[in-house]
Image (tube, grey):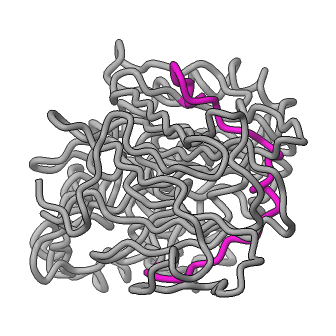
Amino acid sequence: MKTSQPCFLAAFLCFATLSRAEVKITPDRLDNEHASPGFKFPHVPAPLRGDAAAKATFTLLDGQRDGNGGDLDKLHDGRVPTGSDEPGANFFFRGPDGGRLLVDLGSVIEIRQINTYSWHTDSRGPQVYRLYASDGKAADFKAQPKRPDDPAKAGWKLLASVDTRPKDGPLGGQYGVSIADSAGGLGSARYLLFDIFRTEDTDSFGQTFYSEIDVVDRNAAPEVAEPQLTEAVEIDGGAYRFTVDTTEAPDLTEWSHRELIPAMQKWYPLIVKMLPSDGYTAPKTFSILFLNSYKGVAATGGNRIECNPSWYRTQLKGEAIGSLVHELVHVVQQYGHARRPNATRAPGWLVEGIPDYIRWFLYEPQSHGAEISPKRAATARYDASYRTSANFLNWVIGKYDKDLIKDLNAALREGRYDPELWKTRTKHTVEELADEWKKSLEGATAP
């Protein structure tokens, strides 16, 4: 394994001597098979809610945040991912060099413990960093030491050097690190500095998915951030698994057990079969979270679906399940992962039109949710996205090509979509098809 940073010892890592005692670093790891949403390790405490880091200010000093991940708030929001590949629920760096994070606790406190958590199926799982602390009172204190400055020469103390990469075998899994002092406290500090390194440099996927950073005040008692989760639900005898997090919407828990979970169990494998492509494997896990902070209806990032509880409460007997069938299609699509040279970007109207086609014409055709009204027929556009594009796709499938969705999906996922595909499949350009489709709408709705 190649690395671009000094090689630290794994296992129990290293010890930094402070004025009172020794800093003990306890690492824990659960492999991909045994990792679970609760982050329950044999030795490292479970993540906390309301710890000293919850109200701290996190600042990026060096490096660049990966836009596919969450922002710095994900590191101290008291929430942890419910799946092993949820970029939006983690913070991670972009590029080859990692970076530095500054944590300002707001005032000097007596720190009892510092815990860090991460989770990924591959090389983004392990943690590699140096941790410094300061009360900000040293004469030579420098508040924001950037690379290549040595914090130890700018009023900071090195607390720990952490490297949880296993010596042998795969890197993936769920990792926890607990940093504590044998005397019961790490001392007084206001500032913490995490100097973070990548786990490998053989490709661009060596930046750790950091899920949470907890700082425990000796004089406070935070709560364990154990989410109110349904049990991890199996699909097809364990071929797939998913979780539903109703921590912030406990009133939706019973509905999720009664209606949501059975629908997801049935429709996820069906969608996987509808949208195949050569060499592609759909995500084995996904999660559905009801978050008060999310103000839309629902959105999918990777295999994580975020939902607005307020909207769902009004739609439990209406569009609730159908909207999540739409989001399941996004979990399976994964159109942003094409790595072939000169890959084309998937048109947005197809990215959203295909999920709405599966929703309105296969899952709930009886609702007629994608019908075009007489008033809209003349102005309907095939590329208007969502329901309108779903209607267009359904018309083309019915008249010209019953396998259109499968072939469109493969081209979009592989980054080779071209408008010529329509002519190849139907002998008509997409514009010609659109004109014929609109005439059929006008004819169907004429008095």
User: From which residue to which does the magenta span run?
Assistant: 37-64
Q: Residue furthest front?
A: 19
In terms of image quadrants, where is residue 98? bottom left
In terms of image quadrants, where is residue 95? bottom left
Name the one closer to the observer, 237 or 126. Answer: 126
> Which residue is at a point 18% across and 37% down the rendered structure image?
167
Image side of residue 191 versus residue 359, left or right: right
> Which residue is at a point 68% across and 34% down the rendered structure image?
183
Q: Residue 217's x, y, as percent?
A: 81, 46
Evaluate whether residue 407 shows in this view. Answer: yes
Number of on-image labels:
0
- Locate the C terminus and report the quarter of the image it occupies: bottom right
Name the one closer to the observer, 333 or 118. Answer: 118
Evaluate whether residue 439 shows in this view. Answer: no
Q: Residue furthest top?
A: 237
Q: Residue 209's x, y, as percent?
A: 44, 54
Name the one closer to the observer, 307 or 146. Answer: 146
Q: Residue 212's x, y, as percent?
A: 60, 50
Q: Residue 152's x, y, as percent?
A: 51, 74
Q: Is-magenta flag for residue 181?
A: no
Q: Is-magenta flag for residue 42?
A: yes
Image side of residue 418 versus residue 96, left or right: left
Image vertical order of residue 222 relative to residue 94, above or below: above
> Which residue is at a point 68% across and 45% down the rendered structure image?
79
Image side of residue 404 versus residue 179, left or right: left
> Which residue is at a point 29% across and 52% down the rendered structure image?
8
